[in-house]
Image (spheres, rainbow, N blue to C red):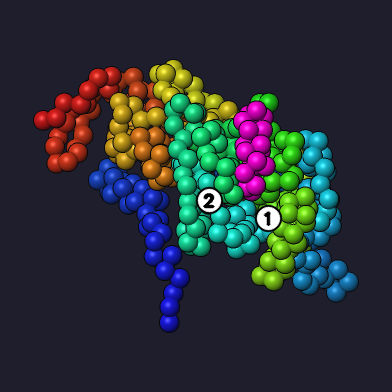
Amino acid sequence: MKINENFLNLSENFLFSLIAKKVKSYKEENPDKEIISLGIGDVSLPLSKVVVDALVKASYEMGVKETFRGYPPEFGYDFIKDSIRKYYLKNNVSLDLDEIFVCDGAKSDLGNMVEILGDNRIIIPDPVYPVYVDSNMMAGRNILLLDGNESNGFLPMPDGLSYEESVIYLCSPNNPTGAVYSKEQLEKWVSYAIKSKSLIIFDSAYEAFIRGDYPHSIFEIEGAKSCAVEISSFSKLAGFTGLRCSYSIVPKEILNGVFNKIWGRRQATKFNGVAWPVQRAAEAALSPEGLEACHTNINYYLENARIIKEVLDKYNIFHTGGNNSPYLWMKCPNNMSSWDFFDLLLHKANIVGTPGVGFGEAGEGYFRLTSFQTREKTIEASKRLDEFLKNMRWYYGRKANKIYICNWWSSIIAW
Ligand SMILES: *Cc1c(COP(=O)(O)O)cnc(C)c1O
């Protein structure tokens, strides 16, 4: 039989396994050292009480004849769709219930949406959450990467792009860079999408981390309902990474309702809905009490991010994120590569982070730190990072079989 050979073109997913391998071997050689991970890419605080109460209550209902539930509606119960509708009203975005599709994860929706799209040019910022690239590679699509860099603040814009029908992936606040698009920037993207007859797939998984004056939803931008879908999740909002619940918003204005209709057809054919207790838990997360608890947790992460950011600011290290995002994306000092910096930070400060190059070529020379660690460990790691940046003007490294000494603020001297 033949297989889908596009899968053979995917790059090996070695990032986190290589990190684990390096950490393990360092631990074996240095059993007395306490390593702190600022590489955690998952929430770490537990579900709030109001969510757990709803989950427990709905679970018991499943064991009682009168309240037992079988298959849920494929697109979600009306009560949860209505909670999402009200959540969007806070940002002056009005949605119809049949534009909301509840699902078990934003990752699935992002991957699955490729199925209902034809062979368009795919535009993806780099560095990026790997799902966008990989799911389009699986479908054999042509991908155009837009480089993020210091000069665009890791927020690529459409300037210079030809007007060709495309599918554009935007993630704001961004994973891995923590960068957030302003209203003016998103207006430019929407106007590009309308002019070029393109579709924007907007990933707003981290919108609840926004504290500044930035759009939470692409639909806050005029005209976006004719050219954008939004995919979001309870994962980062309410700590649902283990519970699984997300939603996609597919406006009926896109292609006169055809896009909304075929997404519904796709979902109804291949997905049988989110569990009753999980939908009740998600509803509880969007209640006033639930949202207050969500934001207490998010504020905890944001304070961690601020603590790390303070150290980077102190040493004038270029970085994005940390204000409206759980992620900090820093330039490796002295033009080090991502992996060289990873090794150095592990060995000299016993801190683990994520090499930026693991999120795309444009991430080379950058490094991601996350705020999902405990407060105590974040404070300890920040002290170490401070010491490291202060004292480690000289270090020994190994590259291309040469031992070299590097002075942080000048050049590399090969020995
Ligand atoms: C965590 C995350 C999501 C959420 O994925 P789920 O499948 O809903 O847990 C979506 N997009 C990005 C960029 C993320 O980092």
Q: Which residue is mark 2?
A: 122
Q: Quadrant of the N terminus?
A: bottom left
Residue 77 drawn in magenta? no
Q: Percent from the top left, x then y, of residue 194?
A: 67, 42
Q: Which residue is mark 1?
A: 245
CA distance separating discs 1 and 2: 27 Å
Amino acid marked by disc 1? Cys
Residue 122 in sight here: yes
Q: Between residues 366 and 121, which one lies in front from this camera angle?
A: 121
Q: Between residues 57 and 392, which one lies in front from this camera angle?
A: 392
Q: Seen from this angle, which residue lies furthest right? A: 66
Residue drawn at x 40%, y 36% as measured from the top left: 367
Q: Seen from this angle, which residue lies furthest bottom? A: 1
Q: Quadrant of the C terminus?
A: top left
Q: Percent from the top left, x then y, of residue 256?
A: 78, 54
Q: Between residues 294 and 317, which one lies in front from this camera angle?
A: 317
Q: Is mark 2 within 8 Å of ligand 1?
A: no
Q: Percent from the top left, x then y, of residue 43?
A: 57, 45
Q: Is residue 374 above or below residue 230?
A: above
Left or right: 24 with respect to 179? Answer: left
Residue 193 drawn in magenta? yes
Local SS, label 1? loop
Q: Is residue 278 above or below residue 212?
A: below
Local SS, label 2? strand
Residue 279 in sight here: no
Q: Is residue 241 above or below residue 341?
A: below
Q: Is mark 1 within 8 Å of ligand 1?
A: yes
Q: State the extent of the magenta-drawn residues as a range.
A: 182-203
Crowd band around label 2 with a 10 angstrom C-alpha radius: few (<14), some (14–19), many (20+): many
Amino acid marked by disc 2? Ile
Residue drawn at x 39%, y 65% as measured from the top left: 8
Crowd band around label 1 with a 10 angstrom C-alpha radius: few (<14), some (14–19), many (20+): many
